[in-house]
Structures are given as C-alpha cells and as structure tokens.
Amino acid sequence: MDKLVIEGGVRLKGEVTVSGAKNAVLPILAATLLTDEHCVIKGVPNLRDTNTMLKILRSLGKNAELNKGKVNIAANKHTNHVADYKLVSTMRASFCVLGPLLAKLKKAKVSLPGGCVIGIRPVDLHIKGIKSLGATINIESGYVLAHAAQLKGSHIYLGGVYGSSVLATDNVMMAATLARGETVIESAACEPEVADLANFLIQMGAKIKGHGTPIIEIEGVKQLHGAEHTIIPDRIEAGTLMIAALITKGDILIKNVMFQHLGALIDKLEEAGVSISITDSAIRVCYKRRLRSINVTTLPYPGFPTDMQAQVMSLMAITRGISVITEKIYPDRFMHVAELNRMGAHIQREGPHAIVEGIKQLSAAPVMASDLRASACLVLAGLVAKGVTTVSRIYHLERGYENIEKKLQGLGAKIWREKE
Ligand code: UD1
C-alpha cells in the first residue's frame, strides 16, 4: 500500500487541466450494456473506479478497453446477466448495471453493494423504480434477482428521505429506455452527470426529455444502437483544485471546467471573499485577501455538493471565525473531522453539523484516509500544514482523482508517494 507524503507551505501556482467526471463515466459505461453495437467513450479518466467498471463489463461479456482516455467497447452480443459480489462490493456505482442488464437481457442478478464508511447507503429507491417498470424482484443470498419479459413505462416518484438519488435515477432511466410506453421520473436527480448519461442515451437512440430537471420523461424504444460520447469535466476535481489554490494562498488557472456546474461552490467562495475569474472553459482562482468563515449546507444539485463538504472543511479549518458545516445527504460523512483535529484543527461534530473554529496554522501529522473525498480534504490540509504530513490508505484517492500528485507537483506542491 502507498502513502502520500506532503511537505506543507508551498503556494500553488500555474495551470492544471481537469479530467473527465468519474460520476458521469461510470453509469455511461454501464449504459453500453443496452446495445450490442460498438461504443466509444472519450475523455475517460484512468481511475481505480473506471477500471473496476471495465472489469465488470468484461465479466458480463463485453470487450472493453481503456487506452489514452478513450474506451472502446467492441460490438458483440453479451449474454451474462450476473454481476458478481467481488466486483460490485468494491464500488457502489456498479449497482447501476442492474437497469441496463434487465432491460437488455430481460433478467439480471446483481450483488447488493453493501454499506461504506460514509453511511448505510440503501438501494430501496433503485428497487422501487425498477419494480414500478413491471419487473419482479427478489433478494436472495445478497443478490438482487430481477426479471421482466417486457418492462412497461410508468409514472415513478423517486424522492427519498434525503431527496433525489443520482444512481437510482440513472438506473431507472436506463431501464426505461427499452420499456414499452412512456416513463415519467418525478423527483429525479438533477446532477450534471445524470444529464450527461441522458445525452449519451439519446445518442444511442433513446427518447428522453427533461434531463437535468426533477422531471424526466422517457419514451421507450425497441432497441438502442452504438454511439460515441465525450465525458463532461469533473466538477468535484475542479472544486478540489479551487480549494487547493485558496488554502495555499496560491494562483491557479484550472482548465477544462464547466463553471455552470460549480454555481453553489462559486457562490460560497465569493461569500468568503474570493474573487474568481471565469472564461468559457477555465476558472482562475487567485488568493488576494484573508477569507471570511462561511456556513455550508450540502444538498442535492444545484445545492452545495456533499462531495465538496470535506474539502471546504479543510479550508474553513484555517479561516478566521466560526463556520457551521451541515451534511444533509450523508449525515455520518464526517470521518475526516478526527483526522483534521489530529492536525490541530478545532472542529466539533454535533449530529449532522460540524462546527469549525478557524485557527491560524495546521500542523503536519500522520493521518489516514477513510473515503475518497476525506482523502482529498487531508491532502489539502497537508499542503498548508507546518511540517511533513503523511496520508495513508490513498487507494481511496485513486478511486476518484486522476494523477492527482502529478497535477499538484505541476503546480509546485512538494508531494510524493512512498510505500507504507
Ligand atoms: C452519487 C455519487 C456520489 C455522491 C452522491 C450524492 C456516483 C457514482 N456517486 O452516489 O459521489 O456523493 O451521489 O451526491 O455518482 N438513498 C436512499 N435510497 C436509495 C439510494 C440513495 O435512501 O435507494 C439515499 C442515500 O443514502 C443518500 C441520498 O439518498 O442519503 C443520496 O444518495 P445518492 O444520490 O443515491 O448517492 P449515489 O447515487 O450512491
């Protein structure tokens, strides 16, 4: 296992290019199961999660390879409908092969993904949506067994206790593309990654309207064909790099960004006193003055993303004043609090809130990554802490950030990888 070693205190400066969005590419790869024809996906980040999804596609009979940011999925008739526990348990997004497998092969057997450190993460909304399309579903030995000779369009309310669900919307939307008649998904997730999946499905011949809004309408078609698609830029990587600029009092031009996807973060950073320059596909974040503390509440898109909660907490840890960070998507997503406190931060957790009392300087410490975004938060803290920080278990980071230490090195950071 590798760890990251970071010597804090360098102001990051220069240009960096954001990779394709992890949360868009995973369901889009799953969507290729809806056709036997050739598909090409471009702008694909080389991540642990991408490679897990490619392994799943191969285990299901697809011939899928990633080469220099491009995935080629050869034309072939895949017939395996069983997504194995070993693969699905390592990555929750793999559960979204359920919808495409069922729609294409009329049956699917997909392992339940299980919980993870950020919470229980149920799949009830996925099951509810797929059942509404007329499928019979049984849970046996940790697997979801679904079958339907012909899925039928339906009106589905998909909101849950914590609002809409990204992957449940993806799963149901994919299944509905081949259902007979019209499906309406109400309280659909509006995340840009859901809209990117819809755009890919439309290129495959699906009839979808309203993607990117809470009501998605899908008119089922008989079959889908091969398509070519370029993945949208990763808004969470862009946001993480924006925080890297601010936390190190640096000046970074972040390229390949869709600023329209970053509204809530930009708004909060402006409230903190940051001025951000935006051009067509780039954002420049330059630290000019002392920041103010801000209160942040995570919400489904277009609200503040839960996937940026940990990173903004590391910034608030060294910003004068008190910030209250409220987590409304995953109330237990606070594993990074204890690790930041090991670095001298003053953060107290109270239920779904973290109360952050900004201090002048963090101090380096050995810390441990617990999940993907918590890892990013610890790397950010390490960039500014006094001394040498080591972040263990960085395989979490590799799940979602392509070449992150190289990108940070390119901006001047003293960061390197060592064996544990
Ligand atoms: C996706 C993202 C993840 C992000 C999350 C929330 C991918 C691959 N992952 O995960 O990075 O943090 O959205 O923006 O896109 N829920 C239920 N029942 C369900 C499904 C979800 O109660 O059947 C709950 C979850 O526990 C959570 C909330 O709904 O509290 C939102 O989760 P959801 O949008 O489903 O997250 P994912 O799609 O798994």
Image (cartoon, grey):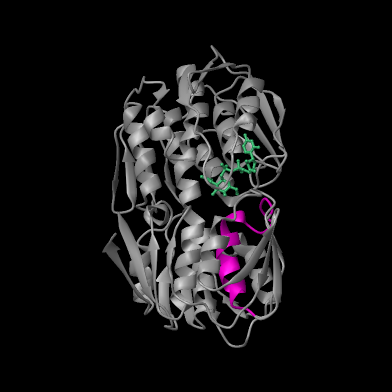
Up-down relation of residue 3 to residue 104 (above or below): below
Up-down relation of residue 378 to residue 388 (above or below): above
306 magenta-colored: yes
Q: Residue at x 60, y 63 (%)?
A: 262
Where is ligand 1, by quadrant?
top right
Q: Is residue 300 left or right of residue 310?
A: right
Q: Position of residue 221 (x, y in %)?
A: 56, 25
Q: Range of the magenta residues?
A: 299-319
Q: Does residue 281 appear in this view?
A: no
Q: Position of residue 196 (x, y in %)?
A: 54, 47
Which quadrant of the view contains residue 71? top left
Question: Quadrant where the C terminus lies?
Answer: bottom left
Q: Position of residue 319 (x, y in %)?
A: 63, 78
Q: Nearer the viewer, residue 331 or 68?
A: 331
96 magenta-colored: no
Q: Residue furthest bottom?
A: 289
Q: Nearer the viewer, residue 117 or 262?
A: 117
Q: Nearer the viewer, residue 355 or 229?
A: 355
Q: Is residue 291 left or right of residue 105?
A: right
Q: Position of residue 15 (x, y in %)?
A: 41, 76
Up-down relation of residue 166 to residue 370 (above or below): above
Q: Residue at x 39, y 77 (%)?
A: 411
Which quadrant of the view contains residue 178? top right
Q: Nearer the viewer, residue 113 or 104?
A: 113
Which quadrant of the view contains residue 321? bottom right
Q: Does residue 385 appear in this view?
A: yes
Up-down relation of residue 333 to residue 409 (above or below): above
